[in-house]
Image (cartoon, rainbow, N blue to C red):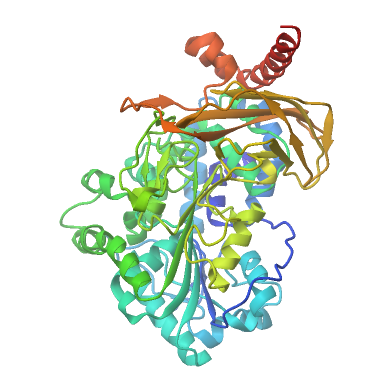
Amino acid sequence: MKKVLCVIFSVIIAFSVCSLAASAKQDDIEYNGYPVILVPGYSSSFMYDTETGKQAWGLDFGKIGPMVLESIADLGISLGAMTVGNADKIAKYIGEGIIEMCAELPCNPDGSSVHPLERYYTSAEDMSYAAILERHPEGGYCSEPKIAAEIAKYTGYENIYNFTDDFRMGSEFCAEQLDEFIESVKEYTGKDKVNIIAISHGGQTVSTYLALHGEKNDIVNATLAVPAISGAGFAFDALMGDVHLDEDCIARFIEYGNAVEADYDWLLTAQQLGFLAEICNKLIPYVLEVIGNWGSIWDFVPADRYEEAKALRLDTEANAGLIEVSDRYHYEIQPKVREAFTSCRENGMNINIVAGTGQSIVTGLAENSDGIITTLSSTGATCAPLGSRFADGYTQVNECGGKYKVNPAMTVDASTAYLPDNTWFVEGMFHGMMIYDPHVFEFMMRTVLDDKIQDVYSDPRFPQFRDSESAALSVYTEFKGCLPGYIDEGATALIVKNCCDKAKVTITSITANGLDLNFRITPKTLNPGETVEIPFTGEIPAVSKKLVDITVTYLFDTVTPAGYRVQSYTLMNGDDVDFDGGYVTVHESLLNKLIGPVLSGILKKLGLNEFLSMIYNVVYYWFNSLTKIFA
């Protein structure tokens, strides 16, 4: 049963950070001297019942990730047989446990708390990290402690402040609590402004604060990481009772969050763990008994799905108070965010957003996301349907001064973002996992502490679009002489990096889909962090806005002996190709293009598609190379 719980709660890992790889202090970051307020992700605040003194919330879900990882292979082998025909029984067992564990947390139908809950600490004096660590040396009552530890390298713990809120309440309520806390920090420190780093739900809280109180101009730098500005997909799935878990996405989420240098996700896919969705859907009534009247859950529902969920779950009379508050957020406050961001930046605030792309929602919502929050909700950008991309030649919606705003994978049009020049997109990065990508994490430190990065053009080391360099993805590529993710006539070689922290990687093949390039590979084993430049032959055509997929297949010394990664590039080397106005399928592997959708679907069900694709990539590369040699 513990193993079942591990998988069910793997979604919650999104709101908790498990571990952090060591990172070096960057000597050229110049801290601006203003206090840093960390506005954490969902469920981060510790609360207690004022009548009983009982702690109502403060669970350590960070311990779940490693436990899932330890048992994932066993899960793939044995869990399916154990649960056949037992979904109701398992859901009842887990659901009753959830209700008992969260007995203090439910809200009344009007959205007010059933129990009188309070946060343990609320003032700046009590919530400086220095004060928290003095009271709790083990790190208890600290939100995002790993992020705080990195910031402290530049500021000291005495200049970092931990915001807490009653996360059950709506975004407007949390924003008012943030306003009070900012005033407390300013008074306590004697500073007239603050820096803010906000994570996930914290990003929604900060964006709401700016919509309500941005005219105060109390912020110097605000970095919103994977923010739930206009909602989170999992909330809609849960409220609609339509959870159909993407087990492959969940497994990759866990791998990414634990920096695992091996692919375990094929085990879950091979075992077809779709039965977990049945358990989750049976669990929903129990979960909604706890969270169904939380204002924050309703504020998480994306705007275009809000009325549908409200019609299903809320009663116009019993839930009138909750509906009033949530309607105000969706129809009066949230629509002001775009204007508020623009106005705040014009008044001198440096507001920056970083978001993940390229994933489905783990609970089933089929939209481009970071696994939890849709890219649209985080950024306001236009996205192609999940599994598709804009066709070659696509023209962005807004001109943006002639700056190209479409990501290399041609799935995101940033010209429509809340902040087109102040939003960064990381392909392949999962929700809340910024610290597992050293490049992204360095960017975050710079934008919150230093004033040099004012937009996506300020520092060429941090372009608007970039693929993730997480150890869980093993390898990373970009063309030498070009912007990351793009190809032009300046390309002289393909740079391949081993992203792993421990494992060595041996490159076995590189193929280009959409461009006739031949990469000259000699056996080369890369140590962790090492890069190699691989030359190529072939013509780079003089056309632009055409997509190319580069596939690197490799061997490495881990549990899984082989793997491959596909990265998308946009060819930008001449006149635009004609745009047919439609979408095309993304990342169709060489094998799947050969065998067609029916057979590839069968292989996926058997759990063999990834394995056979790796073999085919290598065979195709060497056959193609030999053909060119003897032609």
Q: Where does residue 49 sit, x and y in percent of width and height?
A: 46, 74
159, 47: nearer the viewer: 159
Residue 134, compared with residue 84, is above or below; it is below
- For the N terminus, the image quarter is top right
**Residue at 84% across / 34% down in the picture?**
525
User: Relative to the observer, which residue lies in front, 586 or 568?
Assistant: 568
Residue at (65%, 42%) from the top-left corner? 255
**Does residue 153 appear anywhere in the picture?**
yes
- Establish if 121 lies above or below 110: below
How far across and down, in percent of the image, does residue 356 sit?
50, 48
| Residue at 55% from the left image edge and 9% from the top image edge | 595
Task: Indicate the quadrant where residue 485 lies.
Answer: top right
Which quarter of the rendering shows the C terminus?
A: top right
Q: Is residue 108 visible?
A: no
Measured as percent of width and height from the top left, residue 481 is found at: 64, 43
Residue 351, picture quadrant: bottom left
Q: In this view, which residue lies farthest toward the left?
A: 317
Q: At x 28% / y 60%, what residue is drawn?
A: 334
The x and y percentages for residue 133 are: 66, 79
